[in-house]
Amino acid sequence: MEFWRAHMPKGMFLRSACDWHLDPQNVHTIEAYLQSRGQTPKDVEPLSLDFYLTYVDWFQQQKNIESLPVYIKQLDRENDHFAATTVNGDVINAKHVVLAPGFRHFAHIPADLKAKLPAGSFQHTCEYVDFTDATNKRYLIVGGRQSAFEWAALLLEAGAAAVHLSHRHDSPAFAVADWSWVKPMVDNMVDDPSWFRRLSQKEKDDISYHMWSEGRLKIEPWLESRLQSERVKVWPQTEIVSCIENESGEFEVKLTNGEAITVDKIILATGYKVDIARLPVLSAGNLLEQIETRNGFPVLNDHFETSVRGFFITSMPAMQDFGPFFGFTNSVRTSARLIIARLCSESARRHPS
Ligand SMILES: Cc1cc2nc3c(=O)[nH]c(=O)nc-3n(C[C@H](O)[C@H](O)[C@H](O)COP(=O)(O)OP(=O)(O)OC[C@H]3O[C@@H](n4cnc5c(N)ncnc54)[C@H](O)[C@@H]3O)c2cc1C
């Protein structure tokens, strides 16, 4: 959960609700956690990041999950096992490895946008989450989806003097997103893991578009009143034409609608894009060249196993083979069950009773 703790801002709210819990056994759900506190979903929705992290801590305690707080620097395949070298130089040998790398290394900055900005003038949203220095600062946020508008609200509340939002498309509507159709789809994949990959390209595209449009064409309504301020200027259907840093260290930005704005900071709310070659743990070792990939995603079997036997990858990199829902917490129950099923069947094969 490091991404949630270190790369999401304090005061953020989740888009998902209490039904997207973490327990494949449906015991230690968010609702069970609320019951233990004498609360109901109504008391806590929309879920704050702080609340969600207390649920995760509780979940970890209930399940007796102990974690080793160390980064793996490099992962290699050696004969019949894997060797994970930690940043401390220790080596952990394992028969199986599951990689759940999350979002961090997939932060996406479009090349054409980067080319227009002076080096060092911008930060991706996941790198700019501490707003203690925001007072009286002027911001340009490039992007126009939930993150762009939520960062804008949080910056206003932190005392920003001005927040400009520039995006290439129309501004999304403040409307309640409907995710109710996602959970049954993902839950059913426990019994039919190849369901998504068997669909025609058109069917896959329709589902991806449905997911995309709920998430991207709508902004959570609880943001609307927080953005009612003269300090916010929204510039839909615009792109940056040029950006120069003046002698005072301010950024003078011209937009395609002719608007010229001066800001102190530029934040890129430009999302995430999977390319597993960007994962340092893989690029440092010998696994990357052995894993079959397609469009930057690993090719996975029904149990999230890559073309390297015993090596599993889940979360965002599983989206191509399992569907766009796999970038969200909701899918962990399904991926956990499918990976464990594969490990148990191998164990039974090796140790027949
Ligand atoms: C702005 C934003 C809002 C979101 N809102 C929601 C939401 O409302 N609901 C929802 O369900 N999902 C939401 N998501 C998606 C959510 O962040 C992901 O579903 C979730 O983080 C995936 O969890 P994860 O554990 O796979 O990855 P992460 O939370 O990214 O965790 C990755 C973990 O891997 C560890 N790690 C990485 N590299 C190494 C290494 N080399 N060695 C050791 N450890 C390593 C990290 O330390 C970290 O603990 C949101 C994402 C973003 C960006």
Image (cartoon, rainbow, N blue to C red):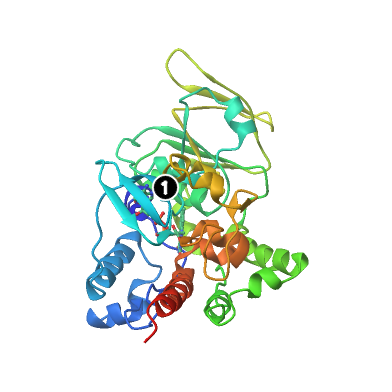
Mark 1 vs ligand 1: CB under 8 Å? no
Compared to 28, does 137 lie above or below? above
Q: Quadrant of ligand 1?
A: bottom left
Whether residue 340 can be seen here: yes
Give the residue at x 53% y 77%.
Answer: 183
Q: In this view, does 285 lie above or below 346?
A: above
In the rendered structure, the answer to whether residue 38 lies left or right of residue 205 reads left
Q: Where is residue 330 in the image (x, y as percent from the top left)?
A: 47, 70
Q: Percent position (x, y) of residue 113?
A: 61, 32
Tell me where residue 139 appears, x and y as whole percent: 46, 35
- Please say if 253 is above or below 80: above
Q: Which residue lies furthest to the bottom in this view?
A: 353
Residue at 32% x, 55% y: name it.
Answer: 93
Front-most of residues 165 and 318: 318
- The residue wearing badge 1 is 76
Left/right placement of residue 120 relative to residue 291 reads left
In the picture, the quarter occupied by the N terminus is bottom left
Label 1 environment density (alpha carbons within 10 Å; few <14, some 14–19, many ≥20): some
Front residue (pair 168, 65): 65
On the rendered image, what quadrant is the C terminus found in? Answer: bottom left
Q: Quadrant of residue 284?
A: top left
Q: How many labels does the image show?
A: 1
Q: Which amino acid does label 1 sit on?
A: Asp
Query: What residue do we see at 39% from left, 56% from top?
Result: 81
**Image coords of residue 192 (percent x, y):** 59, 80
Asked if residue 11 can be seen in this view, the reply is no
Please identify the quarter of the rendering in which residue 112 is found: top right
